[in-house]
Amino acid sequence: MSAPSEVAPDMAISTRGLRKVYGEIEAVKGVDLDVGRGEIFGLLGPNGAGKSTMIRMLCTLTEPTGGTALVAGHDVVAAQEEVRRGIGLVFQEQTLDLYLTGWQNLRFHADIYGVPKGVADERVDEALEMVGLVEHQHRVAGSYSGGMRRRLEIVRAMLHRPAVLFLDEPTVSLDPQTRQVIWEGMRENNLRDGTSVFMTTHYLEEAENCDRIAILDRGEIVAQGTPRELKAGIGRDRVELISADGAELGRALQEEFGVTASVEGDKVVIHVAEGERFLPELFARLSTGIRSVSVTPPSLDDVYLAYTGTGYRVDGHPDPEPEPRPAKA
């Protein structure tokens, strides 16, 4: 392991050269990362990028192959018990006791983490109120819907007021209303207790709620910053065209302007600097067959595409067989 002096103990999370190797596969490749105290930090990346492996190492569930990681100032290898006492964790997989009621699941968690008896019941009541489960608190968790179980799991992880809350794709497959309820609860907890949040997500619109995000691709951090900074760094507008022949328009754009187009049926998407200024020249040279056009500033999807070579689908899963990652500008 690297010397602890290389990391930043005043950060909620600090890693230097963090690696994990499984046989011949290097899942995480020497990651350097700092997450400030009280920060909401999002980690994005394709399936297999190493996101869950990162969380497992930071939560002491998997020992790093190399490098150093501190969580709330404690080394994830040398001080595992201290790390575990100071974190909350929500896995992708459901971990509730389905034979206990919602209230019992929360109260049991409070007891395990040593929440003082005088405040445990109050915290449980607050948690149930936060996620709208007061009316269902005495039903067994096995009778809850998937969204209700997820809400219960997340507030359970907050009960002991952890210094760092880890969420591994906490809202995947949930409806937008339930995701909003969960985000409101996390934000309230963050503001009230200064809890740092480290989450992975498949929903780019959720990443907009993060203070900062990082993109992990093939085990490496390829970009990080605030959502605004990352979008500004792309420096290109998204131009979407609807054409009678999308494939033909895509070829024409390549020949006339040297831009690579993404074609899906009659929809053609290109990225250019100053899109509105580009339009007059476009119509002067290639107006035939274009039915409509729209220009929007860069989105996180554009950022993701620029750094990983693949975009997110609506269902939250990246396109299969991504192209080789493009060189950084």
Image: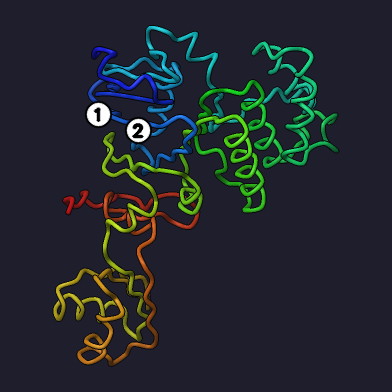
Q: Which image quadrant is residue 270 in?
A: bottom left
Q: Amino acid at mark 1?
A: Lys
Residue at 51% from the left image edge and 38% from the top image edge? 169
Query: Where is residue 11 drawn, in percent x and y?
Result: 39, 25
Q: Is residue 138 left or right of residue 251?
A: right
- In the rendered image, which quarter contains the N terminus? top left
Dividing the picture into quadrants, the one containing residue 12 is top left
Label 1 packing within 10 angstroms: few (<14), some (14-19), many (20+): many
At a point 80% along the width and 21% down the height, the residue shown is 121
Judge whether 72 appears above or below 217 on screen: above
> Which percent across, then down, holds residue 203?
49, 50
Circle 1 residue: 29
Q: Residue at x 36, y 67 (%)?
A: 297
- Which disc is residue 284 wearing? none
What residue is shown at x 37% (from left), y 78% (from top)?
266
**Image position of 104 (left or right of 323):** right
Residue 220 in picture, x, y percent from top left? 26, 36
Nearest the viewer among 70 and 65 is 70
Q: Estimate how packed mark 2 is, as few (under 14), some (14 to 19) or many (20 or more) residues with alpha carbons within 10 Å.
A: many
Task: Pick whichever, 51 or 107, lies toward us.
Answer: 107
The one nearer the camera, 152 or 13, is: 13
- The reply, left or right, for residue 285 in relation to residue 69 is left
Q: Amino acid at mark 2?
A: Gly
Asked if labels 2 and 1 touch by Cβ distance under 8 angstroms, the answer is yes
Question: Where on the picture, by quarter, is residue 138?
Answer: top right
Quadrant, the C terminus: bottom left
> Where residue 36 appears, x then y in whole percent?
41, 31
- Where disc 1 sits, the SS reads strand
Q: How many marks?
A: 2
Q: How is the image coloured?
A: rainbow
* Residue marked by disc 2: 50
